[in-house]
Image: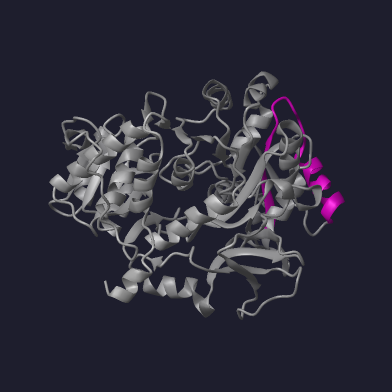
Amino acid sequence: MSAANALYRGPTLGDLFLRALKSNPPDRLAVWDDREELTFAQFAARVAGFSDAMRAAGLRPGQALAQLSKNKADALCAIAAAFLVGLRYTPLHPLASAADHAFILADAQIDALVVDEEGFSANVESLRQAMRPGAIVFSHNESAFGLALRSGRVQADALYSEARPEDIALIAYTGGTTGRAKGVVHRHASLVTNLLLAMGEWEWRDPIRFVAATPISHAAFLFVLPVLLRGGSFGMAGAFSPAAFAELVERRGVTATFLVPTMIYALLDAPETVQSKLAGLDTIIYGAAPIASARLEQALQRFGPIFAQLYGQTEAPNAISMLFKRDHTPDRLSSCGVALAANKVAVLDAASAPVKIGEVGEICVRGPLLMDGYWNRPEESAAAFESGWLHTGDLGRMDENGFIYLVDRKKDMIISGGFNIYPREVEDVLSTHPAVDYCCVAGVADPKWGEATTALVVLKEGRACAPEDLIAHVRSIKGPLMAPKFVLLARSAPLTALGKPDRKAARALLAKAYPGARS
């Protein structure tokens, strides 16, 4: 690095993990899961041991490490160690399929894999075959299949970071809803931007006692350093259920969490005895999928003004805009907030020209938060960055005060009889019906209309409602154009492994059941 470049060298995630580990009182609680607690001193010692084991196995800065693990302290230590060694990290979703794991390991050219021996040991051989010859396999503790990360030193005095700001820090894979997943490349600078936005703009109350109720293989990981750098504790929950989550919040004195909308719905539908245990929460950050305005209003009435919404995507990780607690007013519950400080957001038409205030276009973003591009996919990277903006694929509008209102995913828009219909607008109306617990709207092929608007609906327990009544409900509020032509009542909602509505699965169910396709 030249002297001029070194002069403006920013921090890396390795540097910031070191700061968190060394700047807090050693006996303060740092990390916990359902089995153990680690103080900052214990966390530092384990991270030092893990990083020593990685270096001793021959890993060097710039090489690639993946991890398959449930939420646990050891998994977080392995991630921190990877950043200290200067590795590029790729998480594997613990609920994804073996085929998805194998594809990512091969596509990301992984040099080493950490496998949680408590639950994933049976997967090791198939995963090993997906990697290049000579790739290293680690386990957290002693195992029959790999090198134990806990075999290194246990003193924290030799902690040091080899990461450089220009290095690739993370390759995170998108969900692959429209084909094979793409590896989204982030260098340290974009993830440090994410961290600074969290530290500077999020509405925290100290001391922070945070619990991740979603996998740290995804968005929940981005909460780790903001919590630890503020001297808070970061906890990890296992599988989500309203009763177990509420008990954990009460027992641990949790003050903040991140939830996806379906989790909020489950808490709203839980008995009052469960809901009462959430009284200690002062911050619920939610995102990863749109929330129904009617359910959000219920949540505010039940739990108070403790909600903040984050809008982002893997390409601009979880921090494009925020609907702050103070902005959860009745007229803005369908908004995803205003652009955060580092971002420039515009609503553009098909020619990449700005649309007028209030008109619908594609949400586009510029700024240091953005990805470098897609791993080994130059054409798709160029398409994403067409005209000098990141094209999010989300349709929306912006009001005169800069508040962004998402309309829908561009690819999910329904064209029926020549008219554009946005599924989310129909979902928002269906969600106002007192019998509706969950709904997902999608277009299916229709010989007359081109596409027909259809809806999969799950009713609240103990409630009954006929499909034609739900169709009439939408018609009375939005008119005949927006009313579904078919409603399928289902016992449960199709969800992705992250707990998001699985529109692809819902569309397949609706296409199979829709009678119009056979008329």
Residue located 67% across and 77% down the image: 354
Is residue 12 inside the magenta stretch? no
Counting labels gives 0
| Residue 301, placed above or below residue 474 | above
The answer to whether residue 100 is seen in the rendering is: no
Seen from this angle, which residue lies furthest right? 476
How is colour applied across the structure in the image?
one colour
Seen from this angle, which residue lies furthest top? 273
Does 116 sit left or right of 230 as displayed? left
| Residue 121, placed above or below residue 379 | above
| Residue 345, placed above or below residue 491 | below
Span of residues in magenta: 452-479
Q: Nearer the viewer, residue 272 or 472?
A: 272
Q: Position of residue 342 (x, y in %)?
A: 55, 64
The answer to whether residue 52 is seen in the rendering is: yes
Q: Position of residue 306 (x, y in %)?
A: 67, 38
**In which quarter of the view is residue 62 placed?**
bottom left
Q: Where is residue 386 in the image (x, y as percent from the top left)?
A: 51, 77
Residue located 32% across and 47% down the image: 101
Does 115 sit left or right of 296 as displayed? left
Q: Which of 439 and 212 is in front in this view?
A: 212
Q: Position of residue 305 (x, y in %)?
A: 72, 39
**In which quarter of the view is residue 433 placed?**
top right
The C terminus lies in quadrant: bottom right
The N terminus lies in quadrant: bottom left
| Residue 453, placed above or below residue 21 | below
**In which quarter of the view is residue 344 placed?**
bottom right
Residue located 62% across and 38% down the image: 283
Q: Nearer the viewer, residue 402 or 261?
A: 402
